[in-house]
């Protein structure tokens, strides 16, 4: 097709009706997979772009969370907003309702909005959803990938393995040998990496890994509370707990209070993320600083570059983390002294 492609021409080449092409363009699910793939291929090959019925909407970026709420999400939103504000770009927020992939209705709305790009936070797209965005030349970037997104997908994360190792090494330096670990969901990459860093730090400092001290939960307060109670009620409980998120650490604080334990005299606690509330709790929380705002800013710049035809220097970027030592950790009591 030497001239500007139209729906009619795409339908003719695909051997389907114009309404069928329109369904694919709008992300409708009632099209056979093989037919959809053929149409998507032609859309991508010929660079078809549907003319919008309205020209009032400005350029925008979609920011998609698996679940909105809490300071963790707010830190990322602040990072994205700082960049889009300077660029004169609007921000559209969406969530997956706790799922790791958005519903098809979201894809349909994105195809109708035609944003400059999409930023997926702690969520991902299935192969069909990716194909639909790629066919419309809508780039996407994944922040804190749930799993291995592949070498061809831009992703921004942090050094989770090193963060797990830093937190555990800090507790080992203080003299703790019974260190509990509350990871996030076992299905998520960052959770497993933090636990792997924890186990490596134990082994490299001569402490045998005790599977009974490793628990898995969600990243929220309730999960931290539940698993902290289980750890602290063991016959030989830990003297320190490394929580996979600051929100989990709040749950550990709650469990310690319920059991009459003082932090840090009876129990040292380390969190992960370094949310603003880490400075506000009593005692202030020792935690691993994850540069959430910087991660979000970088993801936004990458997706804007992609929308302008620029290729990023690297598709996978992991930002450095560091310890923020406050007052929730100290050396363990010995013989009740």
Image (cartoon, grey):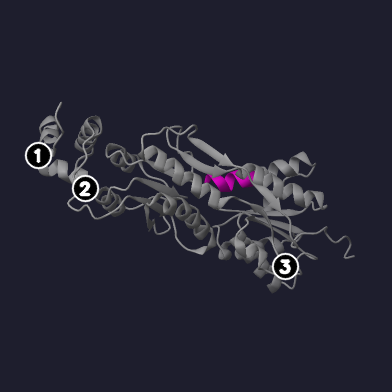
Q: Which residues are magenta?
A: 188-196
Residue that carries the numbered disc 1 in the rendered image: 17
Instruction: Give me the residue at 79% from left, 65% from top.
Output: 266
Instruction: Give me the residue at 55% from left, 52% from top.
Output: 292
Residue that carries the numbered disc 2 in the rendered image: 26
Could you give the CA–CA distance between mark 3 and mark 1, rounded to whole angstroms? 66 Å
Could you give the CA–CA distance between mark 2 and mark 3, rounded to whole angstroms? 53 Å
Residue 198 visible in the picture = no
Q: Is residue 193 magenta?
A: yes
Task: Pinpoint residue 315: horizontal percent, then vertical percent.
Answer: 47, 34
Instruction: Give me the residue at 56% from left, 40% from top.
Output: 318
Count neighbours of disc 3 (C-alpha within 10 A) and say few if under 14, some if 14 to 19, many if 20 or more: some
Residue that carries the numbered disc 3 in the rendered image: 283
- Say which of 24 and 50 sits in front: 50
Quarter-of-image position of residue 131: top left
Mark sitting earlier along the chain (3/1): 1
252 over 6 or under it: above or below: below
Most common secondary structure along the magenta stretch: helix
Residue 73 visible in the picture = yes
Instruction: Give me the residue at 60% from left, 56% from top.
Output: 245
């Amino acid at each position: 097709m030497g001239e500007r492609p139209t729906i009619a021409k795409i339908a003719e080449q695909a051997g389907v009706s114009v309404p069928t092409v329109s369904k694919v363009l709008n992300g409708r699910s009632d099209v056979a997979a093989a037919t959809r793939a053929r149409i998507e291929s032609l859309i991508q090959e010929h660079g078809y772009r549907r003319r919008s019925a309205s020209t009032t909407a400005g350029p925008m970026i979609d920011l998609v969370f698996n679940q909105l709420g809490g300071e963790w999400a707010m830190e990322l939103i602040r990072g994205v907003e700082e960049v889009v504000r300077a660029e004169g770009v609007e921000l559209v927020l969406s969530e997956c309702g706790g799922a790791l992939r958005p519903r098809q209705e979201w894809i349909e709305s994105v195809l109708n909005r035609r944003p400059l790009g999409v930023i997926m936070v702690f969520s991902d797209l299935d192969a069909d959803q990716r194909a639909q965005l790629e066919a419309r030349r809508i780039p996407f970037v994944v922040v804190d990938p749930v799993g291995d997104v592949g070498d061809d997908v831009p992703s921004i994360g942090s050094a989770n393995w090193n963060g797990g190792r830093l937190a555990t090494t800090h507790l080992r330096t203080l003299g703790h040998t019974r260190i509990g670990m509350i990871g996030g969901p076992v299905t998520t990459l960052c959770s497993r990496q933090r636990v792997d860093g924890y186990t490596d730090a134990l082994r490299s400092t001569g402490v045998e890994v005790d599977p009974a001290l490793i628990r898995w939960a969600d990243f929220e307060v309730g999960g931290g509370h539940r698993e902290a109670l289980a750890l602290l009620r063991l016959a030989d409980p830990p003297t320190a707990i490394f929580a996979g998120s600051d929100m989990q650490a709040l749950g550990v604080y709650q469990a310690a209070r319920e059991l009459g334990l003082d932090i840090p005299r009876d129990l040292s606690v380390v969190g992960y993320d370094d949310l603003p509330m880490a400075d506000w709790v009593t005692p202030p929380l020792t935690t691993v600083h994850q540069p959430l705002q910087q991660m979000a800013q970088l993801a936004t710049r990458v997706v804007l570059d992609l929308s302008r035809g620029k290729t990023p220097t690297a598709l996978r970027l992991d930002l450095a983390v560091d310890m923020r030592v406050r007052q929730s950790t100290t050396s363990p009591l010995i013989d009740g002294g």
